[in-house]
Amino acid sequence: MSDELKESYHTNKKRVFVRAIAGPCNLQDELTRLRSLPRVRKGSEIKFQNGPQSFSRHYVEPKDGITQTFHMHLEEYAPGGRTSQHGHVNEAAFYIIDGVGYEIHDGVRYDWSAGDIAIVHNNCVHQHFNADPLKPARALVLKTKPMMMFMNMLFQKQVGARPTEPAPGGVGFEPRHFEENHNHAGQEGMAHD
């Protein structure tokens, strides 16, 4: 790039890095719409999808229109399971509910266990792994995906495919669709008050 072009680029105040946000916008209409939507979604009515190594239960996602700025879903990793290798513009926070595993972010491994939070940064190529060959793992995921979509920053790409066969320890595994004890009382290693 020539010095003249570089100078023009840095001084050009007409640059647009995010597309214009345009369209009908009426705050009262939007508040009326939002207030008409459910405030509680029953987890028992939402089943896990995908598989056979990683499963997702989407509680709130952009297509629902229930929220304007975040997406929330529960991930369940079968014993020894893994996800596809992928990347996206939005950040994500994974609260590890149970199990042990690790992430690979841009080639770097990060180990996690129940109670940890794994953060996926913008545009990071990543993959999630359950390190236990016999037990499942779960993570509650919060994303800013709807806000990114609103700003027309829609990039999401799969780098490595989702496994189509179960991991050796996950043959016959079914995600925990209908847990009755959501407080996890009585599980091995849990402290009781």
Image (cartoon, rainbow, N blue to C red):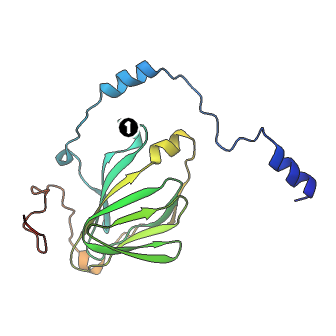
**Residue 49 on image: x %, y %:** 30, 55
Q: Nearer the viewer, residue 88 or 32?
A: 32
Q: In which quarter of the image is residue 81?
A: bottom left
**Residue 27 on image: x %, y %:** 45, 22
Residue at 39% across, 67% down: 83
Three-letter residue code for mark 1 = Thr
Q: How many marks?
A: 1
Q: Which residue lies furthest to the front in this view?
A: 193
Residue at 31% across, 69% down: 53
Residue at 31% across, 78% down: 131
Q: Nearer the viewer, residue 180 or 113?
A: 113
Q: Tell me if residue 30 comes above or below residue 123 in the rendering.
A: above
Q: Name the residue under label 1.
A: 67
Q: Tell me if residue 20 comes above or below residue 12 in the rendering.
A: above
On screen, residue 6 versus residue 39, left or right, reads right
**Residue 18 on image: x %, y %:** 64, 42
**Residue 90 on image: x %, y %:** 50, 53
On screen, residue 11 versus residue 24, left or right, reads right
Q: Can residue 163 be seen in this view?
A: yes
